[in-house]
Image (spheres, rainbow, N blue to C red):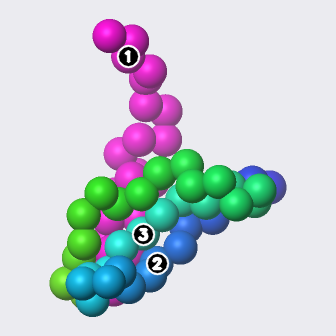
Amino acid sequence: MSKAHFEVFVDAADDYRWRLVHDNGNILADSGEGYASKQKAKQGIESVKRNAPDADVVEE
């Protein structure tokens, strides 16, 4: 079972954003940008799920 969940919320500028939150309350990731609609924010979540399930870690 996942120890994290996505939240969709409205920011101070009335844009929709998402964040990935661990069960302990720590924010693991966020959208980094606001979206004009809730649907677009949810599409951003689906893009992360689809495109980065096994993303490599690159050290610089």
Location of residue 12 in the rendering, given as x and y in whole percent from the top left corner: 32, 83
Q: Amino acid at mark 1?
A: Val
Which quadrant holds the N terminus?
bottom right
Residue indicated by mark 3: 18
Residue that appears at 61% across and 60% down: 21
Does the magenta stretch mainly form a helix, a strand or a loop?
helix
Q: In which image quadrant can residue 41 be found?
A: bottom left
Q: Amino acid at mark 2?
A: Val
Helix, strand or loop for disc 2: strand
Q: Residue furthest top?
A: 60
Q: Are marks 3 and 1 in contact (CB under 8 Å)?
A: no
N-terminal label among 2 and 1: 2
> What is the CA distance from the residue labelled 2 to the residue labelled 1?
28 Å
> What is the CA distance from the residue labelled 3 to the residue labelled 1?
24 Å
Q: Tell me, yes or no, if residue 4 can be seen here.
A: no
Residue indicated by mark 1: 58
Vertical position of residue 49 compared to residue 13: above or below:
above
- The residue carrying pointer 1 sits among few (fewer than 14), some (14 to 19) or many (20 or more) residues within 10 Å by Cα, namely few
Q: Please state the total of marks drawn on the protein image.
A: 3
N-terminal label among 3 and 1: 3
Q: Tell me, yes or no, if residue 33 can be seen here.
A: yes
Give the left or right position of residue 23, taking residue 30 as reference.
right
Residue that appears at 39% across and 12% down: 59
